[in-house]
Image (cartoon, grey):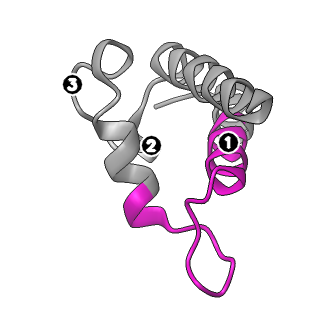
Amino acid sequence: YLNSELKVKSRKSRGTVIHYLCLLGFTTPQDAPDYDRINKFVQNMGANNPKKKILNYLYPAELNKVVTQVIAMYKKEAKR
């Protein structure tokens, strides 16, 4: 089990991923996060998630790679 400090860090990282993906349009018609789409996206991230885990099951090290990739993707889209 993760200790409480890692749980807090992981929760913040998951929140960051959800936030940026919502800004990229991963929302329902009611503007709530579309967790099915978010989890499918995270599972298909390739090298940063080779075991195809959903967002809540990623370890902190894996989560950091996913956060980095999502932020980079957002910045690339924001330049357009």
**In the figure, 44 relative to 71: above or below?**
below
- Amino acid tagged 3: Lys
Tell me, yes or no, whether the two marked residues, 3 and 1, touch with CB atoms within 8 Å.
Answer: no
In percent of width and height, residue 68 lies at 63, 17
Q: Which residue is mark 1?
A: 11
Residue 80, disc: none
Q: Is residue 56 left or right of residue 29?
A: left
Q: Quadrant of residue 44?
A: top left
**Residue pictured at 59% horizontal, 29% vertical:** 70
Q: Which residue is mark 2?
A: 55
In the picture, the quarter occupied by the C terminus is top right
In percent of width and height, residue 1 lies at 46, 31
Q: How many marks?
A: 3
Bin the neighbour count of mark 1 within 10 Å (Cα to Cα): few under 14, some 14-19, many 20 and up.
Answer: some
Q: Is 73 or 61 nearer to us in this picture?
A: 73
- Amino acid tagged 1: Arg
Q: What span is colored magenta in the figure?
A: 13-37
Q: Earlier in the sequence, mark 3 or mark 1?
A: 1
Query: Disc 2 or disc 1, which is closer to the eye?
Result: 2
Residue 51, disc: 3
Tell me, yes or no, whether the two marked residues, 2 and 1, touch with CB atoms within 8 Å.
Answer: no
Bin the neighbour count of mark 3 within 10 Å (Cα to Cα): few under 14, some 14-19, many 20 and up.
Answer: few
